[in-house]
Amino acid sequence: MGRPPSPLPPSRPRAHPVLPADDVVRALVQVLGPLVSLLLASGTDYTRLGAELKPLFVEQARLELLRTGKKETDSAISALSGVHRKDVREWRANGLAERIAQEMSVSSQVFARWVQDPQYRDRRKCPKPLPRLGSAPSFETLARSVTTDVHPYTVLTELVRLGLVEVQTVKGREMVVPHREGFVPVPGSREILDLFGANLSDHARAAVGNLLGQRLHLEQSVFAEGITAESVKELGELARRLWAQARAAMIAEATRCYDADRRREGATHRMRFGAYFWSETRAEESTARDNKGQGESIEKP
């Protein structure tokens, strides 16, 4: 008699609903459009992107197998990801990719404290210009209230490099004047690319988690259609005002939580809270859709 077949693993209830593959791909194509535009603008073509996507598919397939309690063999990873087994073996040989959570930079922490600490804000609750040196409130005392490991001069140099502050001489005294828009790195800088990746990644994680029926996350938006350019401008200004209020409140509470939790066991979690505003004309939207060869009608909400 021949060798009996290997027993099948016990069936497990699915941890999330089965989403139609074609519908998922269709939604992702819509999401990837602006990202492909960014890739092309940076000189990155399909071949380069494909090379980067291959290990990403392997890594995520491994994590999915671990999450569902299955063995992460080369065959299982290959079957789930569609990546050839020899490429999976090469990925293992070069070491498993590890995502390292980056702590908030010192410059970000200093600017956050500047925004939320009443001692360093003006009557409008905006970060106020500070003497560079001297007793509180000064930039020196602000920086030292966040960390004593990094010299205030080093922090100031970084903030100037990022375009977040400038140093002005007022009545013979050096003053550090903050950028009124908050922590907004200069276009094209490494810092703004890091923020871009972190913001979109966490937004996507929240949305995907909701789609898969995991722990519910806040991920909603308000949509309006058939309005004028003047109304768009008005709504855009309202969005900035609302964000400024929410941002200040969240920074204050997040700082309080951090100060209370940083020495406690189990302080290993992180969070991100954000907002966005986008507008375009129907003509631009229709042109983009026609150029894709889609010809589908769009229903009004």
Image: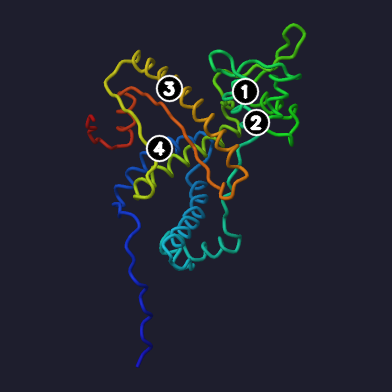
Q: Quadrant of residue 132?
A: top right
Check disc 2 and report the residue beneath it.
107
- Assess disc 2: are there few (<14), some (14-19) or many (≥20) residues with their C-alpha within 10 Å of its C-alpha: many
From the image, state whether disc 1 or disc 3 is nearer to you: 3
Residue 164 is tagged as: 1
Contact between marks 2 and 1 (CB within 8 A): the answer is: yes
Q: CA distance from mark 2 to mark 1?
A: 10 Å
Residue 33 is tagged as: 4
First-in-chain label (4 vs 3): 4
Coordinates of residue 202 in the picture (x, y in percent): 47, 41
Check disc 3 and report the residue beneath it.
242
Q: CA distance from mark 1 to mark 3?
A: 21 Å
Q: Residue at x 74, y 28 (%)?
A: 152
Q: Residue at x 76, y 11 (%)?
A: 173
- Assess disc 1: are there few (<14), some (14-19) or many (≥20) residues with their C-alpha within 10 Å of its C-alpha: many
257 or 203, nearer to the observer: 257
Q: Secondary structure at mark 3?
A: helix
First-in-chain label (2 vs 1): 2
Drawn side of residue 232 relative to residue 252, left or right: left
Contact between marks 1 and 3 (CB within 8 A): the answer is: no
> Mark 2 is on which residue type?
Ser
> Mark 1 is on which residue type?
Leu
Compared with 76, 235 (above or below) is above
> Mark 3 is on which residue type?
Leu
Coordinates of residue 67 in the picture (x, y in percent): 44, 59
